[in-house]
Every structure is written in C-alpha cells, then in structure tokens.
Amino acid sequence: MSDDSGNAGNPFGDMPFFGDFSNMANMFGGGADPWAQAKQIAASVATGGEPESNVDPADRIAFEQLARVAELHVSTATGVSVGDGTPPQIRPATRHEWALATLEAYRPMLQAMADTMSQTMSGMGEDLLPSDADIPGLPGGMFSGDFMAQIMKMLAPMMLSMTSGSMAGQLARTSLGSYDLPIPRPEATELLVVHANISAFTEEWSVPTNDVRLWLCLHEYLHHSVLRRPHIAERISELITRYVSAFESNSQALGSQFGGLDPTNPESMGQLEGLMNDPEALMGVVQSNAQRAMLPEISALMAAIVGYVDHMMDSIGSNLISSYSMISEALRRRRVTADPTDRFLQRMVGLELDQACYEQGRSFVDGVVERGGQDSLARLWHSTRELPTPNEIVAPGLWLARIDIDELVDESNESDEEE
C-alpha cells in the first residue's frame, strides 16, 4: 500500500471497491486518533454546533461561596473531609467544557470496552458479510476470513469515537453536575457543573437560583466524599472493567445486522453508516451471560451509594435550603424519567440506575439507620469488607449482623416483653 495515498495504516485505502468505506472510516476514526475524533463529536453534540457564551465571573464567584458552605456541612454531617487538604473546586462550565472533561474522566473504562470490542469483532469476519463468490467482479479471496477480520477490527475504534463522543456530548446537554452518574473521579481537582442546564432547570421550576446551586454543591461533595476513597474507586473500576471486558461475540446476531451489506454498492454501504450511528443495536446483541451475572453485584454497590447520598441530602438540605423539597422532588423525577439515549452509557458499563435502584438503596439505608443508628451507617465506607452484597442490599439486618454491629432494640418492643 502506498504511503502517499493519504491512507497509510488503512487496509482499504487503495482498493477501489472500498472508496466509500475508506472515507467513512477516516471520518469516524479509522484513519485518525479515535480520542481526537471522540472529542470533536462530543463538542459538536454538546453544543449542537452553535457557539457558547463563557460563564459570567459573578456566577463562578457565587459557586465558590456556596461550595464553602456545602463543604462545611458535608464534613460535619459525615464526619469525613470532602478532600485531602483542599476540597475540589466546584466550577460552572459550558457544555463543551463539561463534555471534554467527562470524556477524559471516563476514558479508562471506555478504552477497556474498545479493546474488548476490537478483539471480539476481529474474529467475526467470515460470518458478517457475503462471500466473494456472491459478488461478481471482485478479486478472488477478497472476502477471506483474514480480510474481513481487518474490516471488523476497524469498526472498534469507529465505535469508540462515535459512542464515546456522542455519549459525552449528550450527557452534557442534560447533566447538572459531575456526579449525575456515580462514577469515580478520585483525582479531580475541580468538579464541573453545567451552567446552561442549571439555568434552564431554575427557570422551568421557578426556584431560587442560589438554592439550586447550594443543592448541587451538597450533591457533588457528598458523592465525592464517598467516591474519592481509594477502595471505593478501585472497587467500582474493577466491577466496570470486568463487565466491559466480558462482551462475547454473537456472530449470528451480528450477521443479521451486517449480512446484507454489499461493499461495491454505495447505497448499501450507506446502511453501514446508519448502523454505526445506532451503536446500541450492536452493543445489545453482544451482551454476554457473564455480564448479566455481574449486574446484581454492581447494582448493590450503586444502590448503596445513591441511597446514602439521598439520605444525607435530606438530612443536611432540609434544614439548609428553603426550597429543598421542591428541588429534590423535581430532580428525583427528572433522573428516573431520562430519555433512553441518556441511559445508553449506564447500560454499556453495567449500571442500572432506574427507579428500583434508588428505592432499593434508600430502603437499605433507612433500614440500617433504624436498626443501628447513624454510626452504623458511617461504617458503609470504611473498607471493601463493609460494602453490601446483593443479598444484604435487600436485607439490611444481614449486613449489620455480618459486620458485627448490634441492632438497636426497639424500646416499645422491649417494654412489651418486660410486661
């Protein structure tokens, strides 16, 4: 292959039958750094292709002041500091800034998925497209297993660019803060909140802007106080990495997606671009039984985190924010009625943050506090040993018994027994 063709490293660049495919591959990452392509896509989706205004310095100052209030209350209520030394700054940002920061924060798990998909898809070649005998005029052996493996291997970085970039961009259009998804950012020196989305929310619900800002500062710092702990961050990273590394090939199902493509027909190859714009169809058919078996363990940890944060938010915020109940109800409704496209990343990495998860987490935390008090709740995050199992998340008494915490005796029951 000639290096002056502009397609160095692209196995299809000098083949006339694959001109359209080659151009599309270069457009979506096959001929460039997939992370650079992902950033371009993220920026385009986040902004809708329109310019964004910089955040007013007065809004930055307001967040700085409210963050100091939130940090003090979170540290007092939880008994732990929000950060080592200086807590991370909470800074209002544009959607573009937030999307790029999130893409970088999620890069390790997205890269793990890309590596797995590359290995999986490169072994599927022969089953996904018609044989060369079915396409007159192609050189013999054009569709050998090795050749088709190269095509399928190219799809992996294309998938990485498109899914990662579009995901980060879409999240930037709907998220309020860095921890709308409870995915660790332990090294973060600042936590970005999306100024435009916050403004839209306050206008839609007619709630005081500073109340929403303070609510969000509490929410960000409570999440960070848990997720910054090394054993929590490592455990979540381990679970997600195991999940995304467990994708398995399903040649028959993928064949139904790609089997009718004809690389000599530009219209047919346009269908491939359509498939690449619907990555959920591809991801859905390669989810493995091993992944499904991992979901209860991931869900138990996620439920414990969101249940704990909701409990502490109510404990702190109800006495601190005048419109706390209204804001909380609006945001809780918002998070469980998200558009399906907003949930793609959750499903992709094994998170199931639906209404059942939040209710299960809150029920677990309420049960722990009722039986063992606030001191027992603080034990949740001491070490990996204290993290609840799938069986314990639905039976807090089992968790209390396992970590050797005596349940409080209900005084009314004790009185009845004495009589």
Image (cartoon, rainbow, N blue to C red):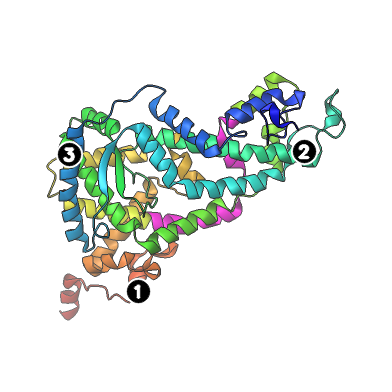
- Residue 54's quadrant in the figure? top left
- Label 1 sits on what residue type? Ile
The image's mark for residue 147 is 2
Q: Nearer the viewer, residue 341 or 162?
A: 162
Q: Residue at x 17, y 75 (%)?
A: 416
Q: Nearer the viewer, residue 382 or 151?
A: 151
The residue beneath circle 1 is 403
Residue 174 in percent (x, y) is at: 35, 34
Circle 1: element type: loop
Q: Nearer the viewer, mark 1 or mark 3?
A: 3
Circle 3: element type: helix
User: Within 10 angstroms of label 1, few (less than 14), some, or many (20 or more) residues?
Assistant: some
* Highlighted range, magenta: 275-302
Q: Quadrant of the N terminus?
A: top right
Q: Return the disc, 1 or 3, that comes first in the chain's sequence.
A: 3
The image's mark for residue 61 is 3
Q: Return the disc, 1 or 2, that comes first in the chain's sequence.
A: 2
The main secondary structure of the magenta stretch is helix
Q: Return the disc, 2 or 3, that comes first in the chain's sequence.
A: 3
Residue 102 visible somewhere in the drawing: yes
Q: Is residue 412 above or below residue 89?
A: below
User: Within 10 angstroms of label 3, few (less than 14), some, or many (20 or more) residues?
Assistant: few
Residue 326 visible somewhere in the drawing: no
Q: Nearer the viewer, mark 1 or mark 2?
A: 2
